[in-house]
Amino acid sequence: MDWLIAILLGALQGATEFLPISSSAHLRIAGLFLPGAEDPGATFTAITQIGTELAVVIFFWRDISRIIGKWFGSFSGRVPKDDPDVKMGWLVIIGTVPIVVAGVLFQDLIRDQWRSLWITATVLIVFGVILGLCDMLGKRVKTLETTTYRDGLLIGLAQVLALIPGVSRSGATTSMGRALGYERPAAAKYAFFLAVPAVFGAGIYETMQAVSEPSSVGLGWGPTIAATVVAFVVGIAVIKLLMDWISRRSFLPFVVYRIALGTVLLVALAAGWIEAG
């Protein structure tokens, strides 16, 4: 049963990681209905996210490998320091610093208090509204190439909010990008780049912790690895669908979904149908 549950959770992780609807919230909610799953926990979530970030690396491999190559090349003088790809390398580094600091400082909150379903339901609604307003009112004049260091840092600060289940990493960073005037594809692409070091870092850290504390991997190593593989496969397909969607349409369906899901959760919690955990 653990294997089946893990595969289902892995598919859910891959399907929701890149959409602005919060994968961690969906894994948390799924634990209420899958027998024996309960709350999959921060460790399971972080490890399976390695699979989805591998999907990002594969999908954007040409961009990512070029950025890394030119960034290193700028130190030897082979590449001008003002090259756009060198700049993007620094933007990713600068934008990653806030979540690294927050992740270290707020470990206990991430693993415990912030996983309350009351918080999850509330932020699903609140950040759904924020996403809708930013997408509707934000200008569409800035491209990825015009990203400034100030904007990169602000989007990185927004990524910190993703430590709270229900906020959504892509939702928070994309909302900030749209509020700053970036086109939807540009905001989403920078959000993808920004997530890679943060998620890999968190996943590797949680994996090392789990090696020393096997009990923290609730479903066991085998099922968790299987879930990570499934998340990778599903994630690649979802990235393609999302990039195609936002090049022509708005985030409105995701906004409506977030508000509806959060409302249903609040009603269920208030009525005592489910426990906050």
Image: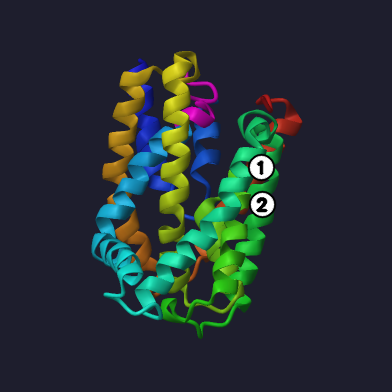
Q: Is residue 24 left or right of residue 62?
A: right
Q: Which class describes the residues within 10 Å of circle 1: few (<14), some (14-19), or many (20+)? A: many
Q: What residue is rendered at 39% in x and 77% in y?
A: 81
Judging from the image, the colouring scheme is rainbow
**Three-letter amino acid code at the position of disc 1:** Ala
Q: Is residue 173 above or below residue 140?
A: above
**Three-letter amino acid code at the position of disc 2:** Ile
Callouts 2 and 1 close, C-beta under 8 Å: yes
Q: What residue is rendered at 54% in x and 57% in y?
A: 171
Residue 101 is tagged as none
Which residue is labeled 1 in the image? 121
**In magenta segment, residue 112:** no
Q: Is residue 174 above or below residue 124?
A: below
Which residue is labeled 2 in the image? 125
Magenta part of the chain: 33-44
Query: Residue 164, percent across and down?
Result: 63, 43
Q: What residue is rendered at 62% in x and 59% in y?
A: 157
What is the distance, in whole Å, between disc 2 and disc 1 at their CAs?
7 Å
